[in-house]
Amino acid sequence: MQAAEKIASEQEPEIKRGTCPICGMGCFTETQLRDGIPVKVKPDRASPHPADCPRAGQALDYHDHAERVNFPLKRVGGRGQGKWQRISWDQALEEIAGKLATVRDQDGPEAVAMLGGSFKGPGDAAAWRFANLFGTPNRMHLGKNCGEAEFLSEWAVYGEIGAPGMLPVAGVTKCAILWGVNPPASWSGHTLTMLQAARRQGTKLVVIDPRRTESAAIADIWVRLRPGTDGAFAYGMLNVIINEGLYDRDFVERWCIGFDELKALVQKYTPAKVAEITWVPAAQIVEVARLYATEKPGQLSFGLGVVELGKATLSAVLGKNFLRAITGNLDVRGGQVFDDHPELTCFREEMHWERLIHHPLRTRDNVSAHIWPVASVRAMQLYLEAMAKVNPLGPGSAAYMVYPAPTCVWSAIIDRDPYPIKALITQGTNTLVALANAKRIYQAFTSPNLEMHVVMDHWMTPGAQLADYVLPASDGLERPNLGGMWGFSNVYSAAPRTIEPRYERRDDYQLWRELGNRLGQQGEWPETLEGWFDQLLTPAGVSFAELAARDLPWLFPVPQAKRYEQKGFATFSGKVELKSSLLEKLGYNPLPAFEEPCWSPVSTPELAKDYPLVMTTGGSSPFYYRSQHKHLKKLRRQHPYAMLQIHPQTAQGLGIADGSAVYVETPLGRVRQQAQFADDLHPQVVHADGLWWYPEQSGTEPTLAGVWESNINVVIPDDPDHCDYAGDNHFRGLLCRVYPVER
């Protein structure tokens, strides 16, 4: 027996291609298996998208971690007491489906809501599909706060969106502006190599960010603006470009409407005035404007740093759209290439948006439509009407047109305003850590009005501790993956499951399929996730298994540009609407003045006397993907505590030493972080680590895995005055004070 085991151990391990389990980005891996057990996971260098970030190196630890949720659990004590009973999947599904049916029958399908997380693979699309078939518009995904504000504005102005992950094309792109994004940390490590390659071949790189990030460190120009003033900076660039005649006159005359109104709007945003607002030298404002307008084709990136500014968001995202348009950089190779519609799959048809719009049981819009109509079922109908001539099926990522505002989800639970939400299904998101005003979210999660809360995740998060059912989710090694399942673009990658799920973990698709089959959706759901992928891939004429078996398991469309020359733009007028008729129809000012954040040295000078520092948060770490990976020891050693970056001069004036514990306080309270000197910050600006919790602490009440200790979102407001034009949370450009922790 020992000899046989030795022979087996000396045999070459089996190698399987798949995707990384660490996050939902779908980066490709090669996994070595012995007797069906993974023993090594490394990047698949033959893939265009290898898993090569620091997080991916911990894939095996993530997959095998002792604290993974492995079995269905039902709460048997009070919420937060940590008392659970292991149950079967059948029992869990029967009880959950039964409660959903009761809530639907008594209060309507809108009384059920879903919360989703950042990039978790095909489970997200399955959740949206279930919601549409069920009839609820109340599905709030964290993608809302990550991009909704910019996407909605782009669709409103020119009917398409630029690819969110777009990078400069080496040798083609002449100017690239990374605005509010740091790809090497937030996307993957190999993007830094791509940026450097583009620079070597002539791309001028501009980075607009309050911090000197990895991208800013290699930039030709780094613009260090005051957090929350991006809209003023955009209008200052427009002022220079228009008044100096640097815009693309032919494109503006043929393809734009509203130019005269835009020209009038930006006249007061002179470089000198914008310099006062943004703390950026007037000469640099002029330099960046001239560079972007004359070095073409030019790119101006999507970025989270511009969509989380509260009241300051609308001018920022519209200002970026106006810049792209009047310079003639829309849908040109090397410039702002539009995302292709997902035509190689039947993704849009499979989402069943029309079923939600016309659902016989749905009688109400989402819970925030009365305050922020731009993100609602009504808005989706308008967007689809505007796009109909060019894009009859609408965008693949139409989920962004419906997302309710987080603050209204909590109001619907706590106060039953404007109507009650009684059941909640949370899929792969750490809500108490990820969204603003965590104490109010806690109030919602512990409210007796919330009759059922189901969480499906890899970990027992603070929010999961307050749930009624916790279900075990499979990871990237244990499930097949079809990249592109958020509906962006027309590019797809396929990877088979590497191993069968351990314990009783299941892929998220099975949750929605099983619930759907119990709730009147029989016949709508293929038996397996692979079967659904086959159905989705019908237009491409290839099965999922066939695509995954290819040496290069990707589907790419034929590159196109300037499609508007054949069909026009997907707007009501068929042109770029610098004064958006769609926004006007929804009651918005389509050409808004720059507005300061709700708290700022300018808008609230009296408050600034007590809270003198401008705080931004949400910057990505290469060691964590959002709130994940705090369990992984090797990553925690690299970044063990929540850090507050602060200028040394400011810190010394406050009696703060580098590495010492400090309190970060806003009018909502204080949390504790660790000071980290950063001499590249403006002395009046600090950056607080977001998305923090401490899994090594007790997960039960009152600590809930340290969620109240360092989580900056505990002290960030979520009231409507602090939300942006779509109801998104405000994380950047707030006010705070910082002082040492005595002990």
Image (cartoon, rainbow, N blue to C red):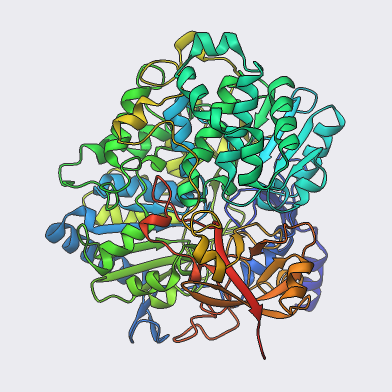
Q: Residue furthest left?
A: 106
Please tell me which residue is depicted at 50% across the width and 13% down the height of the picture: 255
* Horizontal and vertical percent position of residue 633: 71, 75
Foreground pick, 123 / 650 = 650
How many numbered discs, if any?
0
Image coordinates for residue 117, horizontal then vertical, percent: 48, 57
**Left or right relative to 214: residue 429:** left
Q: Quadrant of residue 440?
A: bottom left
Q: Please state if 47 lies on the left or on the right of 394 as rendered.
A: right
Which residue is painted at 67% across and 61% down in the image?
Answer: 684
Residue nearest the observer in this picture, 244 or 454:
244
Q: Position of residue 610 (x, y in %)?
A: 55, 71
Question: Which corner quadrant holds the C terminus?
Answer: bottom right
Report whether 740 appears left or right of 342: right
Q: Is residue 449 visible?
A: yes
Relative to 691, residue 653 above or below: below
Where residue 10 appears, as percent x and y from the top left, is 83, 65
Question: Where, quadrant-wise, is the N terminus in this rendering?
Answer: bottom right
> Which residue: 31% across, 25% down?
385
